[in-house]
Amino acid sequence: MGRSNITVNILEVVRVRPPPHTVSLTLPLTFFDLGWLKFHPIDRVLFYHVPELTPSSLIPKLKSSLSATLLHYLPLAGRLVWDQTYTKPSIVSSPDDGVYVTVAESNGDLSRLAGDKPRPATEFHPLVPELHVSDEMARVLAVQITLFPNQGFCLAVTSHHAVLDGKTTSMFLKAWAHNCKQEQECGSRDALTYDLIPFMDRTVVQDPTGIETKLLTMWVSASNNKRSLKLFPSKVVGEDVVRVTHRLTRENIQKLRERVVETTRAELHLSTFVITYAYVITCMVKARGGDPTRQVCVIFASDFRSRLNPPLPSTYFGNCIVGTGDFDLKAEPILEEGQGLGFMSAVESVSGWVKGLCSENIEKSMLSPFEAFNRMEPGRQVISVSGSTRLGIYGSDFGWGKPVKVEIVTIDKDEAVSLSESGDGTGGVEIGVCLKKDEMERFGELFYLL
């Protein structure tokens, strides 16, 4: 795999505002948001294969439907601020605000980029827009539309992690797609369905133990005792890092589940997520190899909207995810050979973490990563998850069909894997992985030993 000759040329950058006469809005962050305040933005890219599409039939429709969608998702047009006016970071949107949209053109091969085989991870970076962040202000959302002449286009959305989780992002994308498709097919837009209208009342989030205050104190301390919205530095992604999509079919997952049931009598939680993530952990740890006593950090986040008491509406806007896992696992039990012992160890761990998800553990889950990251040794393997198989991201049809592929670009920055439902609707799972080329080859060999 040689050096890429792909070019991406920016044609224009425009600000798309909500419809006229939109009111101003201020939305304070909750402790669910504050936990992600300094983490890098999430970059999603949706690829659409539409060879006959022309810029004149695409760009105006995407812009006008985005404007209409911002009427319901007004915070996305705004900015995150944290100055002396606000005791905590808040999203502020005024009638003059809007989402910056970059329109670009590429000579790349869309089918190859949207494929599953190894591709240099850095090839995807020019396809995503930059999100402006400073000490005092951060944009909430940025969009890039990249045209591939006679092939189709890709739509990239970069979102601030302290404002949107995966659920909210997928709601927004599907609402935007709904408006765009209706505009083309009917010449007008039907009202959004209930499941796409965000619920923005922040008073429903209760914080009896003062998690918010503790998080704010930690962030101020981490920024030399000043208020700052600047993000943690992102890891530089090398030219030797490749991106691959692996797949587990419904039958693969059931086969792995049956293997677990045949091996143990323990009452384990054997959901599709548990089976998939445990299998990925096993392959990643074995692909890295090395000293069995080395430490491995395994973490993931879970949607807590329905786990709270009382539960939040499923359409709640913002973050409502809580992380769990173990920062101090040993590689040894997962590296164990014979009769799937390593996989069984991973299943037992992930099952236990899922079973432990409850509202009583929220404070510990929100605060403990600060201490854990501070004591993390250089070179420790960190495995985390971005995305979910429950978001229905492949339902984002803007009027030109469903995306042929969805990628979460930012997994290349922090050894994360991405999970999504299979785009073909067969009930399988798509697993995005970014690793150095030699390690990826070992991962692939292990993955297909099913």
Image: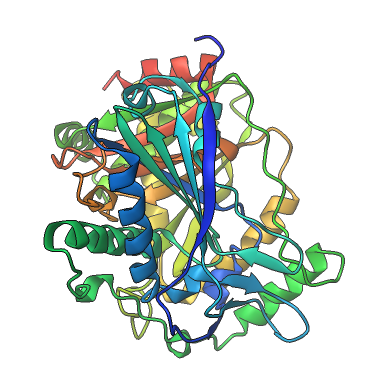
Quadrant in the rendering for residue 378: top right
Q: Quadrant of residue 421?
A: top left
Q: Considering depth in this image, is 312 or 75 the residue closer to the camera?
A: 75
Residue at the (30%, 73%) spot, across then down: 314
Query: Residue at 48% of width from left, 23% of height from top?
Result: 286
| Rendered residue at 49%/74% (across/down) | 75
Please name whichever residue, 248 or 313, is drawn nearer the observer in this view of the structure: 313
Q: Is residue 64 left or right of residue 188?
A: right
Name which quarter of the figure residue 428 lies in.
Answer: top left
Considering only vertical position in the picture, is 34 above or below 240?
Answer: below
Q: Position of residue 167 (x, y in %)?
A: 36, 62
Viewer-side residue, 186 vs 48: 186
In the displayed structure image, the side of residue 251 where residue 362 appears, left or right:
right
Q: At which x and y percent is residue 226?
A: 84, 71
Can residue 116 be spotted in the picture? Answer: yes
**Residue extending farthest top:** 2
In this orientation, does residue 268 appear?
no
Q: Nearer the viewer, residue 432 or 124?
A: 124
* Total count of labels: 0
391 in relation to 422, above or below: below
Q: Residue at x 22, y 51 (%)?
A: 397
Q: Can you say which quadrant of the picture contains the C terminus? A: top left
Location of residue 90 in the rendering, given as x and y in whole percent from the top left corner: 61, 78
Q: Residue furthest front?
A: 56
Colouring chosen for the image of the structure: rainbow
Residue 406 placement (x, y as % from top left): 34, 40
